[in-house]
Image: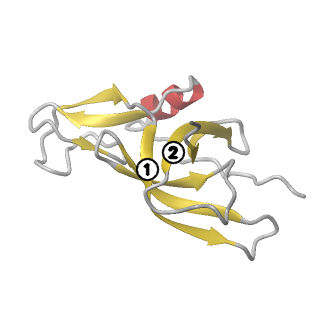
């Protein structure tokens, strides 16, 4: 069975801290200091109030599956999902370490990291262990 490979992310000045934190095993999200809302994908302008007063915060890494899709026609089947974090943001991600037939909406998940082709850590999610 072939191992799934992940393409390298596009890293910009705006997202460099996010990707460095991922290399350190941390998941960051942006929080607006003006309106207090969190947002993802990281950007310097708040998409809720358009303030440029945003800062990084470490996320819990826990959430639940909002929606998912299983790709079975690939060499190795895999699942992609929207995961809703406890911090009230939704991320598009891969689900790993899961029985693809056991996936369900609202399944509790936690972040883990996989390496891209060049070694950059990428946040993915696995079922939360009891």
Label 2 crowd (10 A; few <14 / some 14-19 / many >=20): many
Residue lying furthest bottom in this view? 73
Quadrant where the N terminus sits is: bottom right
> Please, what secondary structure does the residue beneath circle 1 have?
strand
Horizontal side, residue 60 vs residue 47: left or right = right
Q: Residues within 10 Å of mark 1 (few under 14, many from 20)?
A: many
Q: Residue at x 21, y 43 (%)?
A: 45
Q: How is the image coloured?
A: secondary structure
Residue at image coords 53%, 47%: 10
Furthest residue in direction front, as rendered:
130
- Circles 1, 2 touching at the beta carbon (< 8 Å): yes
Residue 83 coordinates in the image, percent (x, y) = 44, 53
Tell me residue 113's x, y (percent): 62, 37
Q: Nearer the viewer, residue 118 or 35?
A: 35
Q: Nearer the viewer, residue 101 or 126?
A: 101
First of labels 1, 2 by sequence position: 1
Q: Which mark is residue 109?
A: 2
Which mark is on residue 64?
A: 1
Rendered view: 62 above or below 80 = above
Position in image of residue 119 (x %, y %): 70, 36
Quadrant in which the C terminus appears: top right
| Residue at left offset 34%, top offset 47% | 40
In the visual, does 7 lie left or right of 24? right
Is residue 129 positioned above or below 64 on the image? above
Mark 2 lies on a secondary structure that is strand
Q: How many marks?
A: 2
The image shows residue 83, relative to residue 67, as above or below, that is above
| Image-based side of 33 in relation to 117, left or right | left
Alpha-carbon span between mark 1 and mark 2: 5 Å
């Amino acid at each position: 069975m072939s191992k799934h490979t992940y393409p390298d992310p596009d890293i910009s000045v705006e997202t460099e801290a996010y990707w460095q934190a991922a290399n350190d095993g941390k998941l960051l999200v942006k929080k607006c200091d003006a309106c207090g809302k969190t947002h993802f994908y990281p950007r310097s302008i708040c998409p809720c109030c358009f303030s440029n007063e945003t800062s990084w915060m470490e996320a819990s890494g826990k959430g639940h599956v909002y929606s998912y899709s299983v790709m079975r026609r690939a060499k190795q089947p895999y699942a992609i999902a929207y995961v809703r974090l406890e911090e009230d943001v939704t991320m598009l991600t891969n689900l790993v370490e899961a029985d693809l037939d056991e996936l369900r909406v609202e399944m509790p998940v936690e972040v883990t990291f996989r390496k891209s082709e060049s070694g950059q850590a990428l946040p993915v999610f696995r079922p939360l262990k009891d």
